[in-house]
């Protein structure tokens, strides 16, 4: 359930004591899951990109951490979808075109945050490297070593990663538009 809190938002037109605006926030579970996924993606994405520049002796270690974090993102995203189905979220504000754009970008973010870890997990298995999550828990895979589809899965993973980066840039651009230029309460709803 969303909640409405008094949030102190800096305002040029009102003295500080009067700059309290009521903001309907996302439920705590939604906010925690949002920021948890954001932090994990901000760790996992660059790690995956820089694997190609690592020394051969540590490449498999980097893959293990990258894939383990990605697998964690997958499970948190599944929890996030479940959370979205059972919680009430604040209404989106603004013109219809912005609300539609926000809905589309959020839906694509969710899709790629599911497709990317699944394709990465399956690709590494198809390349012959089954996941042992954080080096501790062997994870069953529907694929064994399958070189004939490994590169296709790797391509899906890579395209998903770049698509996610573009969507992330759009998302951050919208946050900056709302918070810095329009100075509305959109960001405060997710804090």
Image: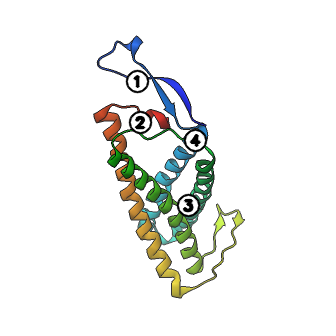
Which circle, 3 or 2, is nearer the viewer? 2
Q: CA distance from mark 1 to mark 4?
A: 24 Å
Q: CB of mark 4 within 8 Å of CB of mark 3? A: no
Which circle, 4 or 3, is nearer the viewer? 4
Left or right of residue 179: residue 147: right
Spot occupied by residue 74 in the image (x, y as percentages of width and height): 58, 60
Please rate how many residues cluster around mark 4, counting C-alpha atoms within 10 Å: few if below 14, some from 14 to 19, many from 20: some
Asked which secondary structure carries label 4, the reply is loop
Question: Residue tagged by mark 4?
Answer: 88
Which circle, 1 or 3, is nearer the viewer? 1
Question: Residue tagged by mark 3?
Answer: 70
Spot occupied by residue 169 in the image (x, y as percentages of width and height): 35, 52
Q: CA distance from mark 2 to mark 4?
A: 16 Å
Relative vertical location of residue 132 with respect to residue 110 in this rendering, above or below: below
Question: Residue tagged by mark 1?
Answer: 9
Asked which secondary structure carries label 1, the reply is loop
Mark 1 or mark 3, earlier in chain: 1
Relative vertical location of residue 189 with respect to residue 121 in this rendering, above or below: above
Instruction: Say which mark, if any, is on residue 186.
Output: 2
Spot occupied by residue 85 in the image (x, y as percentages of width and height): 60, 50
Which circle, 1 or 4, is nearer the viewer? 4
Mark 3 or mark 2, earlier in chain: 3
Residue 21 makes an appearance in the image: yes
Report the residue at 34% width, 37% height from top: 178
Quarter of the rendering occupied by the N terminus: top right
Relative vertical location of residue 148 with respect to residue 112 in this rendering, above or below: below
Relative vertical location of residue 61 with respect to residue 146 in this rendering, above or below: above
Left or right of residue 22: residue 72: right
Q: CB of mark 1 within 8 Å of CB of mark 2? A: no
């Amino acid at each position: 359930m969303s909640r409405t809190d008094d949030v102190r938002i800096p305002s040029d037109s009102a003295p500080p004591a009067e700059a309290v605006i009521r903001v309907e926030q996302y439920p705590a579970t939604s906010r925690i899951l949002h920021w948890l996924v954001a932090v994990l993606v901000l760790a996992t994405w660059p790690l995956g990109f820089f694997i190609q520049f690592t020394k051969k002796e540590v490449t498999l270690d980097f893959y293990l951490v990258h894939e383990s974090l990605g697998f964690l993102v997958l499970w948190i995203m599944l929890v996030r979808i479940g959370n979205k189905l059972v919680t009430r979220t604040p209404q989106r504000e603004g013109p219809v075109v912005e609300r539609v754009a926000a809905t589309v970008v959020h839906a694509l973010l969710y899709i790629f945050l599911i497709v990317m870890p699944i394709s990465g997990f399956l690709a590494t298995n198809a390349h012959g490297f089954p996941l042992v999550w954080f080096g501790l828990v062997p994870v069953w895979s529907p694929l064994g070593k399958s070189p004939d589809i490994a590169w296709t899965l790797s391509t899906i993973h890579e395209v998903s990663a770049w698509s996610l980066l573009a969507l992330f840039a759009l998302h951050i651009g919208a946050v900056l538009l709302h918070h810095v230029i329009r100075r509305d309460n959109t960001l405060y709803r997710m804090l």
